[in-house]
Image: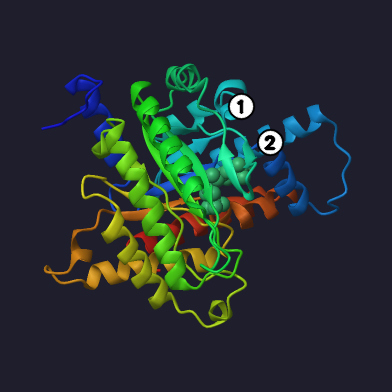
Amino acid sequence: TLLLPHHSVAVAKELTSVARALVSPRGKGIYATDESPDVIEGMLSAASLNGQENLNEEEKKDRRRKWREAAYGALTNDHISGVILYPETLLDFKLGETLTKKGIILGVRAHGELAPFPASPFEFIVQGLDDLLPKLQAARAAGARFSKWRAPIACTSEALGLPSTVSLEVQAETLAVFASISQQAGLVPIVEPDVEFSADADLYRSVEVHQKAIRMIYTRCLEHGVLLEASLIKPSFPQPGLKHPSRKTITSEEIALATASVIANSVPASVPGVVFLSGGLEPSVAMKYLSGVNALVNKAGPSSPFSRLPPLSFSYGRALQGEAMKHWVRGDTQAMKNAFDNATKGCSDAAKGEY
Ligand code: 5MM
């Protein structure tokens, strides 16, 4: 039986089947293209040959529309179940149809800009709840069937003290309100707790922060009546921070065990799938980490809690498009297509534990 306090059984069933379709069959995952205009501009400039170009706002907009068009044109649904679009791409460029024609499910970025916490300037409040319902309803009318909200979570050693409890409470509450409004608008919510790895936390501390953050999110989601069967989670991989000495020696096997433990200990069994973010890791590393945790699950015996985990797949941005973008800015569309094919195949293999 489906239990969705604010919806009919028919709507609950539709949402649940979209959530499952995003992670099935095994090996399919999501391509995240929801970078804000400034961020995608920075990426395109960095990838271009001179990096110095002086484009005005219209020219920049035209360039990012062309990039999106080319990227979606190169995709197939062999390994990609869904794509997350920035609202401009869906509503202004109207590029959704290119994807739906290929059998790819449309998602929309729901979160707005970040604002630093006055009391803790290294932590951020995510804006965008106020006008969320009409925005998501407009996205649904334009073809979207899922949405995503990213909550950045600081992570230092315990001595340095981040994340603060108050920031975790705010992120959990915000993600839960987002998820309930998303379902109200007829979109499957993906909650994205993105635990950063730039500081001095060791692997154990990263695991602890992931578990605490994710448990708090689900406690709040249940309070808000979110139908977990019709939602997904997009977490980071637990890992030592860039400033911790063990960063240099950590193995994929250690990351795999930490990742499987975090999911087993904090994601409720009713959640139908986990789609990891790549977080700026080298593409091959993001694929190795995903493959490692899936290989561990594949080996788990029936009495292991890991054998009961939902599909563990990907919702990668940078790890999927980095190479392709370098070719596109040079005008080599065939090489761009090959790079997309390689990256999506690599991610798909990793989601089966075979990379
Ligand atoms: C694509 O980037 C998304 C956020 O963009 P802004 O930095 O412009 O706000 C982000 O939520 C993204 O979907 C995830 O981080 C996954 O992308 P990566 O590149 O980490 O796999």
Q: Residues within 10 Å of mark 2 (few under 14, many from 20)?
A: some
Mark number displayed over residue 263: none
Relative image position of residue 237 (x, y in whole percent): 45, 62
Q: Which of the two residues, 215 or 75, is positioned nearer the viewer here? A: 215
Query: Do we see residue 353 in this rendering?
Result: no
**Residue 60 screen position, x and y as percent:** 77, 34
| Quadrant in which the N terminus is drawn | top left
Ligand 1 has an atom within 8 Å of the beta carbon of the residue at disc 2:
no
User: Image quadrant of residue 107?
Assistant: top left
Q: Please state if 128 lies on the left or on the right of 48 as rendered.
A: left
Instruction: Please say if 290 is above or below 337.
Output: below
Residue 88: numbered disc: 1
State whether residue 21 is above or below residue 243.
above
Q: Is residue 208 left or right of residue 166?
A: left
Sequence-first disc among 2 and 1:
2
Residue 75, horizontal then vertical, whole percent: 50, 44
| Number of residue marks | 2
> Vertical placement of 142 versus 72: above or below?
above
Q: Quadrant of the C terminus?
A: bottom left
Query: Residue at position x 34%, y 72% from top?
Result: 257
Q: Is residue 77 visible?
A: yes
Instruction: Return the x and y of residue 189 as percentages of the image width and height.
Output: 38, 35
Badge 2 is on which residue? 37
